Amino acid sequence: MVDSDHDGVLDAQDKCPGSQQVYKVDPNSRIAPLFEPAHLIEEPTAVTVDAEGCAMDSDGDSVPDHRDYCPNDTLPAISAGVSKRGCPLQSDGDGTPDYRDKCPGTMQGIATDRFGCPKKSESLQ
């Protein structure tokens, strides 16, 4: 029985055999330190792996938790698309995610409401 990448999942069951795990912190744990050969650091970062030996992705957006800046994406956000950092896309740069943006194409720098539409100026009384 061999576990070549030391992530706690035997090679025969490991669906991510090239994971960058070096050794397990605890033999009873699914947490293994991340090893980046090009960026060695004194204390490796712990990465949680699933039963198949792959890095965990709790919200299901295809971005592993250890790289996900928005780890709790909702299904509407994920369906509309997420960036490589796991955050909802916002194509026009107005600060409103695409899945909620009712005014796509708003110019950057324009004050918008929560739906990405330009705020109406207050009328004078």
Image: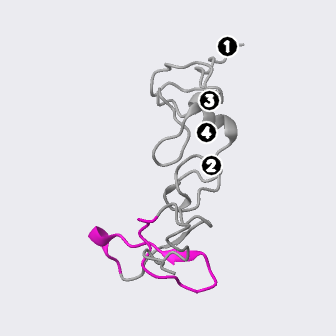
Q: CA distance from mark 1 to mark 4?
A: 42 Å
Amino acid marked by disc 4: Ile
Main secondary structure type of the part rendered in magenta: loop
Image quarter for residue 124?
top right
Q: Is residue 117 highlighted in magenta?
A: no
Q: Residue at x 68, y 42 (%)?
A: 74
**Residue position marked by numbered label 4 in the rendering:** 78
Q: Residues within 10 Å of mark 2 (few under 14, many from 20)?
A: some
Mark nearest the camera among 1 and 3 is: 3
For residue 67, say whether it is visible.
yes
Q: CA distance from mark 2 to mark 3?
A: 17 Å
Q: Which residue is mark 3?
A: 99
Q: Residue at x 61, y 65 (%)?
A: 50
The answer to whether residue 96 shows anywhere in this view is no
Mark pair 3, 4: CA separation: 9 Å
Residue 19 forms part of the magenta stretch? yes
**Bounds of the magenta span?**
17-41
Q: Are marks 2 and 3 in contact (CB under 8 Å)?
A: no
Numbered mark located on residue 124 in the image: 1
Q: Nearer the viewer, mark 2 or mark 1?
A: 2
Q: Residue 119: x and y, percent?
A: 61, 21
**Amino acid marked by disc 1:** Leu
Badge 4 local density, few (<14 within 10 Å), some, or many (20+)?
Answer: some
Q: Are marks 1 and 4 in contact (CB under 8 Å)?
A: no
* SS at mark 3 in the image: helix
Percent position of residue 98, x then y? 57, 29
Are the residues tagged 2 and 1 within 8 Å (C-beta)?
Answer: no
* Mark 1 or mark 3, earlier in chain: 3
For disc 1, the neighbor class at 10 Å (few under 14, some 14 to 19, many from 20) is few
Q: From the viewer's perspective, tell me whether residue 16 is left or right of residue 37.
A: right
Q: Secondary structure at mark 4?
A: helix
